[in-house]
Image (spheres, rainbow, N blue to C red):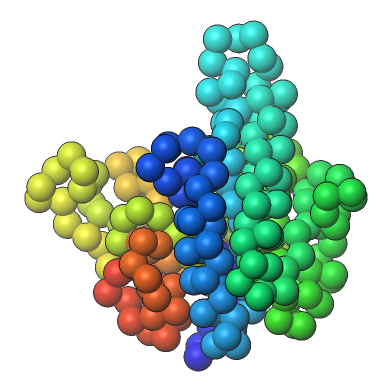
């Protein structure tokens, strides 16, 4: 097992399921079981979940009534709601889990403390990093990359609905070609957009490989970490 410590990023929308909003507990359970298979294989796992199933700052601020900064704080709080739910699902599968938030809310979770997070990971606990970076104008992709670098993860895995990165949108173009491996500079190109530029730049600066994979294929996360790269793309 080459990758001992990983950070897995799920979008908020992934939790919503068919409904397209809110939280589907069956999806939570599925994700928790996928994470458990990694922990059982001796992998230390950090998780970042987005908040897009509840609210995004840009959308909240669209008509100018809510300020962007406030909208972003609402988005960060949404990630905490998802984090609490994910924590429950992880515990339900028998995992040990701790949530840490980038904005202090100590009745709900520990504040983010890098050394403490690292200790939890060493003890085999899953750590959920919530409330993004704690700053408006960032995304949870950037928060995930930042935490991955901070905890010394070997790789960040962006678990999505697609099995990797394509040269154009596979939902729109039949002739879209999957790119199994690409450079950070390719990933920064507008039509590719693996993650936002800030997160890719941070990954590039710190030589953190980014894996984009299909989370709906059961066992895919563990397969990837065992070297089966069929259902993913890697940016490095
Ligand atoms: N957000 C923020 N700072 C951060 C992370 C997130 O302001 O460091 C806000 C931002 O408004 C974002 C929302 O939280 O739209 C939810 O996160 P994101 O859109 O990344 O979630 P996802 O698309 O992954 O579900």
Residue farthest toward the bottom in the current orientation of the protein: 1
What residue is at 75 percent from the left and 59 percent from the top? 99
Toward the right, the furthest residue is: 106
Q: Residue at x 40, y 55 (%)?
A: 160
Quarter-of-image position of residue 216: bottom left
Number of callouts in the render?
A: 0
Q: In the displayed structure, does residue 193 sit left or right of residue 109?
A: left
**Residue 151: % across, % down:** 70, 70
Is 32 or 74 nearer to us in this picture?
Answer: 32
- Kindly tell me whether residue 27 is visible in this rendering: yes
When the figure is inspected, residue 195 is found, relative to residue 1, above or below; the finding is above
What residue appears at the point 81 percent right and 77 percent down from the top-left corner?
119
- 82 relative to 21 in the view: left or right: right
In the displayed structure, 41 sits above or below 38; it is below
Instruction: Using residue 31 as the reference point, say whether residue 114 is left or right of it.
Output: right
Q: Relative to 216, does residue 108 appear above or below in the rendering?
A: above
Residue 133 in the image, given as x and y percentages of width and height: 71, 47
Residue 69, image x, y percentages: 70, 25
Q: Nearer the viewer, residue 223 or 28?
A: 28
- Nearest the camera: 14 or 191? 14
Expressed as whole percent of the image width and height from the top left, the position of residue 85 reads 65, 52
The quadrant of the picture showing ligand 1 is top right
Location of the C terminus by quadrant is bottom left
Observer able to see residue 153: no
Q: Residue at x 30, y 69 (%)?
A: 231
């Amino acid at each position: 097992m080459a990758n001992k410590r990983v950070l897995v990023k799920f979008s908020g929308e992934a939790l919503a399921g068919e409904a397209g909003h809110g939280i589907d507990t069956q999806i939570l359970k599925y994700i928790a079981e996928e994470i458990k298979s990694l922990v059982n294989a001796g992998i230390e796992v950090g998780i970042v979940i987005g908040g897009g199933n509840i609210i995004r700052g840009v959308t909240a601020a669209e008509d100018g009534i809510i300020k962007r900064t406030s909208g972003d704080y609402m988005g960060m709080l949404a990630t905490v709601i998802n984090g609490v739910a994910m924590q429950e699902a992880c515990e339900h599968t028998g995992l040990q889990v701790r949530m840490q938030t980038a904005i202090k809310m100590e009745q709900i979770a520990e504040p983010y403390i890098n050394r403490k997070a690292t200790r939890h990971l060493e003890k085999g606990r899953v750590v959920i990093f919530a409330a993004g970076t704690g700053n408006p104008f960032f995304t949870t992709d950037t928060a995930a990359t930042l935490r991955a670098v901070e905890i010394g993860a070997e790789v960040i895995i962006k678990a999505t609905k697609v099995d990797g990165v394509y040269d154009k949108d596979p939902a729109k173009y039949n002739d879209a070609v999957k790119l199994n491996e690409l450079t950070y500079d390719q990933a920064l190109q507008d039509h590719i957009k693996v993650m936002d530029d800030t997160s890719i730049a941070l990954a590039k600066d710190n030589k953190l490989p980014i894996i984009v994979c299909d989370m709906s294929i059961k066992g895919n996360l563990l397969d990837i970490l065992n070297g089966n790269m069929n259902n993913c793309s890697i940016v490095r």
